[in-house]
Image (cartoon, coloured by chain):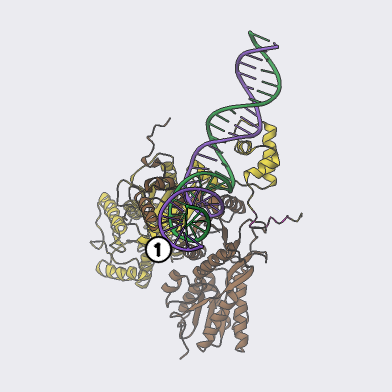
Chain colours: A yellow, B brown, C green, D purple
Amino acid sequence: MAAHPPPARGHRAVTLSDVARLAGVSVATASKALNGRRQVKAETRARVVDAAERLSFSPNALARGLLAGRTGTVGLLTSDLEGRFSIPILMGAEDAFGSGRTSVFLCDARGDAIREQHHVRALLSRRVDGLIVVGARPDPRASLGPDLPVPVVYAYAPSESADDLSLVSDNVGGGRMAVEHLIGCGRRRIAHIGGDPTYGAARDRTVGVLEALAVAGLELAGGQPFYGTWSEAWGRGATRMLLDRTPDVDAIFAGSDQVARGVLDALHELGRDVPRDVAVVGFDNWEAMAANARPPLTSIDINLEHLGRVAAQRLSAAIDGEPTSGIEALPCRLVTRGSTAPLT
Amino acid sequence: MAAHPPPARGHRAVTLSDVARLAGVSVATASKALNGRRQVKAETRARVVDAAERLSFSPNALARGLLAGRTGTVGLLTSDLEGRFSIPILMGAEDAFGSGRTSVFLCDARGDAIREQHHVRALLSRRVDGLIVVGARPDPRASLGPDLPVPVVYAYAPSESADDLSLVSDNVGGGRMAVEHLIGCGRRRIAHIGGDPTYGAARDRTVGVLEALAVAGLELAGGQPFYGTWSEAWGRGATRMLLDRTPDVDAIFAGSDQVARGVLDALHELGRDVPRDVAVVGFDNWEAMAANARPPLTSIDINLEHLGRVAAQRLSAAIDGEPTSGIEALPCRLVTRGSTAPLT
DNA sequence: AATCTGACCGAAAAGGTTTTCTGACCGTAG
DNA sequence: CTACGGTCAGAAAACCTTTTCGGTCAGATT
């Protein structure tokens, strides 16, 4: 174990000319050698590479970026890190970029437009090659504007402008998928207890529900979708009301996993067996909620990590000169657990 | 084969010399005018500022950083973005930096040492001014090494090296705090159902428990702490075992909120009223878990966001030449909810 | 009138890398 | 022996900003 010569901090970082000097060549040659350019004799290249290694040289990305006009960085602008929806998107994006040679600046605007502007300016000043904007809730948000010097991709919350590219999850498809699954389980009296009706996503899921029911020639049990809040308490209350009014329900599609937890609770208290008497499907596939429910909750997963990855790909494409625009809806995925089962 | 017309935004970014030209001064003067240097006439400065505004000039941080030897960026290296512990730390750090003029590179190593090394190299190549390393679990982890060219702060998981600076939460203090609260509620027969004993944090909490009991001249109810996993199921099982063995328990301190949820469940099934018969305290203050429990769960909050903020401050200090080292334990905070109350 | 003092502005260097262009050298063909 | 082609190395420019240093000019002082 050789004691490292302490390359004390504050020590000037080793530069390409240090490498060149040690290898006995010019900086130009050193650069070419390290970058695999072909105009260097093999033996010279080896000498340079060796020198670089010995000095543990790492090229200054700033200098490189300054010259190239590209920095290999992107900005990830979120509005709500606290919420649990941003994180998977962020992970997907970071993952997709991280495997290449792009680094990610993270900014959280905390839902404040001023702060968002501030961050955008800071990022542009750092000459990011592009931006991903992750909204706090899945409703349309203001565009950052058409005159930014770099491409932008909106994820989760679409931009209000059709000239931007937005990636969202297909809530209509998700609602349809849930009901199709319930129908596939032989259920016929299917109710929908939605979430907060001020969310477009909540209404979209209902659209999917109605589509799937129409195809099967069924009506919505309870006569209408019920809207409230995204809470467990609402799930409980709505379920009591529903069973009071329509006791023969055999399936409930809840607007979120939290609502579904409330639904399960109420069904339990009312003496209905899940999934025998009533099957329940949630939405979001929030692992901690769904997996720990009793019984574990079948749920629709909106694939946020995938959404983040696609956002990264689209942004990369745009940076490489192949921009796209419009709203792209990404499909959901059904995760079956114990709360649904075929009628026996 | 440029099939695509170059994006209109491929336009060269506006530079300081553009501003200078428009204002009719030299770049040197323009720079001084914009940076508030005192050697320019007020009227000249106004002309420059106006020109900069008209061109919406934003200075190139790369060029600035290249010259200054400081980039105003730091790397945030996490191992487990998916887990819910990294996020608050990350938010705190981003917040503390974001208010200044520092930007944050986010990297997730996914628990892989190779990937971590890769990210460190990339960050150093980008000449970050410092690094914050957020561990996946609160046990000591390998140091990145003593010979990095920039200061490093370890958060949540301390470094194995005492020469590094590590910030962790005070689990001993947290355990003590929980028991002191229970004693303050008049409880005397206090049991501890811990989590996974392979976690140092689980054992530390027990240490705090025993300290607080000793001060009050009490013994641990059940005769020993119980260890298992961080799961609801373990909480249920352990509680049944405990009540079987020691039926007169009047308080349970659980190793985590999930364990506490299991404890509550079991107590409910066994017909004990919470908090009248048995008071329960959880750990982590996981909002979604604690607030939705019935009754809502008193819990110990480990202040992760604060930890992130402090990490950012310490890193800034180190960057400014005032390094610190050793392990700094940050205090926890008691959040009282319905699951604890004074004996009546 | 000559010198000095400020106030203000500009030229130039520095920071690290990549790329283009030029130049040296060697071997081979004429 | 000359001309030529090919191979490899180096000099210099470019990217953009900040800072230092020197210079000009007006007005004040001796």
Q: Quadrant of the C terminus of chain A?
A: bottom left
Residue B163 in which image quadrant? bottom right
Residue drawn at the location 42% of the way across and 54% of the way down: A304
* A172 vs B47, nearest the viewer: B47
- Work out whether residue B24 or residue B146 is closer to the camera in this orientation and state it: B24
Residue B129 appears in the figure: yes
User: In terms of image quadrants, where is residue B322?
Assistant: bottom right
Percent position of residue A342, x then y: 38, 56
Residue at disc 1, secondary structure? loop
Q: Which residue is mark 1?
A: A110
Query: How far across and how far down the image is residue B110, in percent?
Result: 55, 55
At a point 67% along the width and 64% down the height, the residue shown is B161
Label 1: chain letter: A
The overriding secondary structure of the stretch rendered in magenta is loop
Q: Along the line of sight, which residue is nearer the eye, D3 or B148?
A: D3
Q: Is residue A174 left or right of residue B298?
A: left
Task: Check residue A6 for magenta coloring.
Answer: yes
Task: Please state the horizontal and vertical placement of residue B25, each as a whole percent of the image.
Answer: 41, 48
Q: Magenta segment, which residues? A: A4-11
What's under tag 1, amino acid-wise? Arg
If the image is split into quadrants, where does the N terminus of chain A sit? Answer: bottom right
- In the image, B55 versus A257, the foreground residue is B55
Write the residue at 57% across / 68% down.
B229
- B310 relative position to A174: left or right: right
- How many residues crowd mark 1 within 10 Å: few (<14), some (14–19), many (20+)? some
Measuring from the top left, give residue B313's x and y in whole percent: 54, 67
Q: Is residue A42 magenta?
A: no
